Image (cartoon, rainbow, N blue to C red):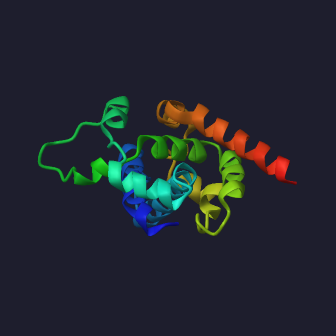
Amino acid sequence: MSADLTPVIAAGTRWLLTAFPPAPGAFSRALAEAQARQAVTLAATLRYPTPLDVQLLNLLGPGGSTRLDWLTGAEHSPDTDADWRTWVDETVVSWAACLLATPALSVDARHLVDRGQSGELTRLTHPGDHEHEAAPLLRHPDLLEPVAALHRALLLDLLDLRDNENAALK
């Protein structure tokens, strides 16, 4: 993972945990955060695969969370620290929601970017009972659907396109 993606990954992770809070307890919070961070990291690596893509992201900015907040009905008091919301990338969060809702899709995505960039993704790709219990809202396909549906087609097209390119190289 490029260090230049760190603000987008941190903001996307925070947004997912705010919109889909974990079960009570420090252990659940840590497991939910690990899952969200893994999903956002993989999605960001797919969305910004080259150093040039990352540089353009840093130059132009990711767009913010306004549409996602509206979609999920999130309301924020004016005194809350909202600066992090400007670093939320809607496409990255949507793709992360797709990956969280469908572990098999995250395995496919992992294979495409597995160049050491995405790090360890076991909690995302092979969630166990602890992961599901810690993040029941974050792993619920029906609850994630409005966010996942925003850019799912683009993600699936990207995965199919790369599958076809990999097949042509063999």
Residue 48 appears left or right of 74: right
Question: Picture coordinates of residue 48 (x, y %)?
Answer: 51, 53
Q: Residue furthest front?
A: 52
Is residue 13 in view from this perspective? no
- At a point 58% along the width and 51% down the height, the residue shown is 46
- At a point 49% along the width and 31% down the height, the residue shown is 150
Residue nearest the viewer, comparing 49 with 40? 49
Question: Picture coordinates of residue 61 (x, y %)?
Answer: 33, 49
Quarter of the figure that contains the C terminus = bottom right
- At a point 45% along the width and 65% down the height, the residue shown is 30
Q: Residue furthest left?
A: 79
Residue nearest the viewer, comparing 31 with 102? 102
Question: Picture coordinates of residue 86 (x, y %)?
Answer: 28, 48
Q: Residue furthest right?
A: 170
Residue nearest the viewer, comparing 23 with 162? 162
Write down the quadrant of residue 130 in the picture.
bottom right
